Amino acid sequence: MITLSALIFASCGKSTESSPDMLSVEFEKYVMPNGLQVILHKDHSDPMMACAIMYHVGSGREKPGKTGFAHLFEHLLFMGSENVPTGEFDRILEAAGGSNNGGTTRDVTMYFEQFPKNALEKVLWLESDRMGFFINSVTPRALAIQQNVVQNEKRQGYDNQPYGFTEHLISENLYPAGHPYSWTTIGDMEDIRNATVDDVKEFYEDFYGPNNATLVL
């Protein structure tokens, strides 16, 4: 967060003159034939690596009556794939000395790992596998489990939290009804409860392809 803030403030400066104190991150960027954007940054002083894949879809791509779906989908993707059953992604990564997590905003959904650099090939395989072979592993039971998890998360973080509705009220009043920013990322309880496997498959087909993703190493 500190690095991101520094980048934002540096880009907002009025002066066009370079400063020796200005933050500069060298990187290489290219687009693969399948549309995947790749951004590379080298830091040989650290034996650890970071991998982040960002899908350009968040709650802002949802529709009224389908709110909270981007965040629900994030949870589902952690359940595995055809080749990596539930729990195996974490087991493989942790055995290599790594860790992972993810997050959803209005505009993007991201998944990231930190690991020793000798595990790079393994991590890239894990990410590419769940991008390409995740959807057929989604069952009504798997969906129901994550619907319950997200609903409980909403109760703990919003419904039963002091001032938990603040973000909801601000969004509702800041944007007109029907605007994709007029609801929170967590969504409405009824919409989360009513999500179906067909909804999951449609969401995957629309947004979870390599041409809608950016990979950062």
Image (cartoon, rainbow, N blue to C red):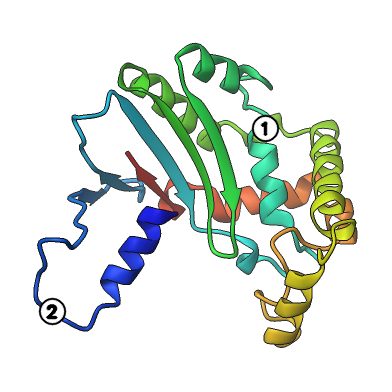
Left of 179 or right of it: where is 13? left
Left of 135 or right of it: where is 28? left
| Residue displayed at 41% across by 19% down | 122
Q: Position of residue 164 (x, y in %)?
A: 81, 63
Please state, as top left, top right, bottom left or bottom right, where the C terminus lies in the image.
top left
Work out whether 15 lies above or below 64: below
Q: Are marks 1 and 2 in contact (CB under 8 Å)?
A: no
Work out whether 50 lies above or below 180: above
Q: Position of residue 180 (x, y in %)?
A: 66, 74
* Residue occupying the far top of the picture: 95
| Lower sequence index among marks 1 and 2 | 2
Q: In the image, what residue type sits under mark 1?
A: Asn
Q: Quadrant of residue 121?
A: top left
The residue wearing badge 2 is: 16
Q: Nearer the viewer, residue 180 or 174?
A: 174
| Residue displayed at 65% across by 63% down | 59
Q: Position of residue 166 (x, y in %)?
A: 77, 72
Secondary-structure class at tag 2: loop
In this rendering, which labeled residue sits more in front, label 1 or label 2? 2
Q: How many marks?
A: 2
> Quick check: can you spot residue 32?
no
Q: Position of residue 78 (x, y in %)?
A: 64, 33
Secondary-structure class at tag 1: helix
The residue wearing badge 1 is: 136
Please state, as top left, top right, bottom left or bottom right, where the N terminus lies in the image.
bottom left
> Quick check: can you spot residue 89?
yes
Q: In the image, what residue type sits under mark 2?
A: Thr
Q: CA distance from mark 1 to mark 2?
A: 51 Å
